[in-house]
């Protein structure tokens, strides 16, 4: 049965000390809030985890990383998928950049693999992937020469996949409309096919982001539906998209989207994550999840994760928020048993 995980990065993404930003929420507090959630005796089984400050120093010593593993395990949690610090301003840089940039990108993947090994040896982590993206924000530069730029990202991803394979890890490229070469369902498939290492590099589907794939937000030429589509038109298009992308999908985020984009700080204009019970949510979370999770075990998926990126801190600090999320996750898991 699929394990239920909560993401730790909503305490970090879009947070900071710039004007209009809220402060980060510590790893310890995010773990407490996750551990406090309970629905009919069911609790979260684990967490997915962003490998960067202030939650984690990616250069931390082995002993310090084992202490973090002890902290997580002390809440009864497993660690699942890890997010490599591949973005400019963290460890990495653009996968579409010059050699200096791509070398930084690859060093971030190597760092993530090292941390994964320590967690694996500790025993707190026994499944999950390492998440990446192109780390090239926006699509304008990519559009200057789409074919060549996709080839450049694919070459970086192949090198990254080789690093991961040497460590016994798999990489999942998260489809988000803000990342160049990954900004539409068609461009994402083109990139995965260009890398052509399906045993090591696959796709991470997020319900909120892939809804905007369907709408063609950053690639109108790839839109499959319009906002005023009928329910029948929506699910016909959803099937078309998921049938193409599901074979690549090795990691899955449960989420909700209201059809809008949202951003904060340096993480700008991507699929807006909404509360699980948001009245403006466009998705039937349980039904849409089934399209992605069909045959999940055959692709090595052992857990699913909630992503509530860029929720305001007041919402994150409210315990009922996590109970509502956990309830949605349970419904997805229970429906998936028969998928």
Image (spheres, helix red, strand yellow):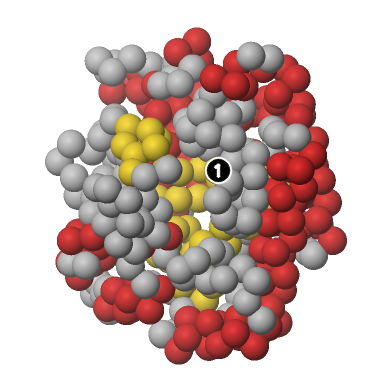
Name the residue located 37 percent from the left edge and 72 percent from the top edge. 26
Name the residue located 50 percent from the left edge and 10 percent from the top edge. 221
Name the residue located 38 percent from the left edge and 33 percent from the top edge. 269
Q: What residue is shown with label 1?
A: 174
Percent position (x, y) of residue 232?
A: 32, 20
Percent position (x, y) of residue 245?
A: 58, 33
Q: In this rendering, is residue 182 above or below 157?
A: above
Q: Give 74 or 266, whichever is nearer the viewer.
A: 266
Badge 1 crowding class, 10 Å Cα cut-off, few under 14, some 14 to 19, many 20 or more, is many
Number of marks drawn: 1
Percent position (x, y) of residue 205?
A: 51, 43
As drawn, is 72 to the left or to the right of 142?
left
Q: In this rendering, is residue 96 above or below 33?
A: above
Residue 172 appears in view: no
Q: In which image quadrant can residue 206 be found? A: top left
Q: In this rendering, is residue 215 above or below 72?
A: above
Q: In this rendering, is residue 214 above or below 271?
A: above
Q: Give 161 or 285, whichever is nearer the viewer.
A: 161
Percent position (x, y) of residue 57?
A: 57, 71
């Amino acid at each position: 049965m699929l394990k239920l995980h909560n993401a730790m990065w909503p305490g970090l993404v879009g947070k900071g000390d710039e004007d209009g930003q809220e402060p980060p929420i510590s790893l310890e507090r995010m773990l407490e809030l996750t551990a406090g959630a309970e629905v009919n005796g069911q609790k979260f089984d684990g967490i997915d985890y962003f490998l960067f400050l202030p939650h984690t120093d990616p250069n931390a010593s082995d002993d310090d990383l084992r202490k973090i593993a002890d902290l997580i395990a002390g809440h009864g949690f497993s660690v699942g998928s890890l997010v490599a610090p591949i973005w400019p301003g963290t460890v990495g840089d653009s996968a579409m950049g010059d050699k200096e940039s791509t070398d930084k990108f690859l060093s971030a993947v190597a760092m993530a693999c090292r941390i994964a090994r320590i967690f694996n040896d500790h025993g707190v982590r026994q499944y999950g992937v390492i998440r990446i993206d192109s780390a090239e924000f926006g699509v304008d530069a990519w559009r200057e020469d789409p074919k060549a730029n996709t080839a450049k990202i694919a070459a970086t991803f192949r090198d990254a996949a080789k690093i991961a394979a040497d460590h016994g890890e798999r990489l999942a490229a998260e489809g988000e409309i803000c990342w160049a070469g990954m900004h539409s369902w068609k461009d994402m498939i083109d990139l995965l096919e260009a890398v052509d290492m399906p045993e090591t590099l696959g796709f991470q589907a997020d319900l909120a982001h892939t809804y905007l794939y369907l709408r063609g937000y950053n690639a109108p030429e790839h839109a499959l539906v319009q906002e005023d589509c009928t329910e029948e038109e929506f699910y016909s298009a959803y099937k078309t998209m998921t049938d193409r992308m599901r074979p690549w999908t090795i990691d899955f985020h449960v989420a909700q989207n209201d059809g809008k984009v949202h951003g904060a700080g340096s993480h700008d204009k991507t699929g807006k994550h909404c509360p699980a019970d948001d009245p403006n949510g466009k998705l039937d979370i349980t039904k849409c999840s089934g399209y992605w999770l069909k045959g999940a075990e055959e692709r090595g998926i052992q857990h699913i994760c909630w992503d509530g990126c860029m929720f305001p801190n007041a919402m994150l600090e409210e315990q009922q928020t996590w109970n509502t999320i956990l309830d949605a996750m349970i419904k997805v898991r229970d429906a998936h048993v028969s998928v």
